[in-house]
Each structure stands twice: as C-alpha cells, then as structure tokens.
Amino acid sequence: MRIAVDGSGQPEENPQLRIALAGAGKWGRNYIRVLESIRNVRLVSVIDPDDSAVESALKIAGNVSAYENITSCMNQQHIDAVIIAAPSDMHFDLCMEALNAGKHVLVEKPMTMDLKSAVLMKNTAMEKDLVLMIGHILQYNPAFINLRRIHERGVIGAVNYYYAHRAGCAPSSENNQESTLWGLGPHDVSMILKLSREMPCRVRAGRADAYGSDSQCAVWAVLDFPDGSSAHLHLSRLESEKKRRFVVVGTNRVAEIDDAAMPPSLKMFSLPAGIGRDEFLPENDISPVEIALEPVEPLLAQCEHFICCIRTRITPCSDANEGVNVVKVLDALQRSMDSDAQFINL
C-alpha cells in the first residue's frame, strides 16, 4: 500500500494521463523509471537539448517522442502535465511555458532561484486553475511522514530546536551550476517549514569557501522563529561521507531521521528530563527506539501524489505556496552570506 500523504486515495479507474518530461539527465531518468509503474499514466515526450541525454533516456522510456525544446512539444503533443527535472536556472522559463499552455506542472526543487519569479509561477497556476507542485521529495519520505504525524499528535512536545546535517563530496564536474545552499538547502528548509507551520522572523548564514566555488563549499545557517524555536543547518559538499540527518528536539522527545542509513531510519528518545509514557517509549527511557517505516520510494510517492492532485484537485502537500516560502528563506540566507553573515529579517 502506498503512503497517502493527505489521506486521500486515487479513484480506481481514471483516464490515462499523458506526461512530458523536461530534463533527461540522471534525475530525469529516475522519473522515467517510476512513471512506468503508475497505473493509467503514460510518458509520451522527453524534452532536452542534449542529444546524448535524450538517447540515454529513450533507452529506458521506449516509444516516446523527443524534443529539443518545450515549445515544440507543447505545439505538437496532447499533454496533460509536465514534469520539470532540468537545471534550476531553467525552471522558470519551462514552468511558465507549460502553465501558459494549460498544463499541470511538477517542478523540481528549488522551484526557481528568484523570489519574484516564484511568486509569478504561483500566481499563474492559480489564475489558470492548474496544479503546480514542487518536488520537495523529503515530504514524501516515509520517515518524515511518520515524524510529522508523531509531531502533530503532540508526542514530541513543543519544538525548541531543529538541526540538519546534509553533506557529501561533489566532484567539480557534478552540480557545478548549482550552489551548495540552493542545491542542498531546499530539502531541510521545506521540512522545517512544514513542521513549524510558520516562517522564520530572521535568518543568517555563512560559508567556508575552500575552492573558490559556490558549488564546492560548506554552508551554515540559522533560522529563528517567532515562537522562540530555532533551526541550525549544516550543508556541505566538502565531506567524504554522505550525511543526511534531521533532528527535532521537543519538550518531551527527540526525533532523528537518518536518511543516509540503509534502510533510512526514524528514531526517538526521551530527554533526560523528559517524563511520561506513550506507545513509542517507556517512561524515562533515554535509549533510542526505532519507528517502523513502510518501504516506499519517496520519488514514486511524490509522483503518485502529483497524479492524485490532478485527478482529484486536492492541494499538493508541497504546493506552490510552500515553494515560494522556501525560496523566500533561501533568498534571505543568500543575502546574509553576501553581507558577511548579517541577520536578515523576514
């Protein structure tokens, strides 16, 4: 059984949805793979100016049409929706062309790297009554879905602190057009905003620039919230080990996701001063207890949710409002880094 992010399921019988994929790189080919397993969904077009990327994609996708640009595809194909997995600096143009052609859109994170453009994308989708969903994939990770449910039930208590450590070693030839902040930051910022249900009141960020490259550096960031809670992020492409830790510290419990573990894990434990008994932890036991997770691939769950939103017109879990808020926070963090780590008020 697939995870239902919002509690809604898809109708058993639906007309086939025809999907175009813009971006046939490594991540785009993952979309091709998962789309094949979704009922009544057909990938009909792949869009990419890189012939070698298209050739690799067609080996997986089979009988689909290939286009160098999205305009040709929109003019020649009956398409219901577009998935955009192209580089971030292409998101705005691709998304606007698809929306203006009347297509629903799932766009990878970040939705764009310019706040005004993000707002325009959101407003265009609203005006045309189209689904615009952002690929904040960790919203569809079973570990985060369970963490969110536990938090909403009050098990963790009032949150005082969030901590995220997302790191690895990116070769200079990989992701060289995407900065560490904008490439890694959307994951943790989106999760923090989902749990906090409010925007930070001020942020600051700095970086350790080892090689004179925005894509190969370490970034630290602080988000302060109106309720007194705070978040610390450590983002790095300068570490030999892959790190994917997300920690939430509440007045009753601490929850920790390790998405780099095999398989990914969600653990909870009591603070030494914590009291009380619940279904997850015995009284005053500070040893970690692992929460059982359903083995669901987040990308597949994300795509299924996108299809469900098109068919039922429910609001996506990672909708355009959330996408704009994530861009707003990242934009403020970027401005802080560019001004010697000064606090930026939001």
Image: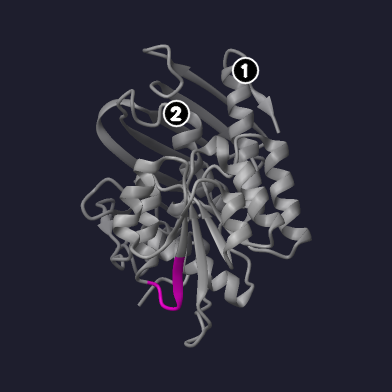
Residue nearer the viewer, 8 or 343: 8
Residue 39 lies in the magenta-colored region: yes
Query: Residue 174: horizontal and vertical position, in percent?
Result: 35, 30
Magenta part of the protein: which range?
Answer: 38-43
Marker disc for residue 180 = 2
Mark 1 Cα within 10 Å, few/some/many (few <14, many 20+)?
A: some
Q: Residue at x 37, y 35 (%)?
A: 165
Q: Residue at x 78, y 59 (%)?
A: 127
Element on which disc 1 rests = loop
Q: Residue at x 57, y 50 (%)?
A: 70
Element on which disc 2 rests = helix
Mark 2 Cα within 10 Å, few/some/many (few <14, many 20+)?
A: many
Quadrant containing the N terminus is bottom left
Query: Residue 6: horizontal and vertical position, in percent?
Result: 53, 70
Dividing the picture into quadrants, the one containing residue 30 is: bottom left
Label 1 sits on residue? 342
Residue nearer the viewer, 135 or 70: 70
Say if 22 sits above or below 280 in the image.
above
User: The residue under label 1 is which amino acid type?
Assistant: Gln
Dots 1 and 2: beta carbons under 8 Å?
no
Query: Residue 244: horizontal and vertical position, in percent?
Result: 33, 42
55 on left or right of 304: left
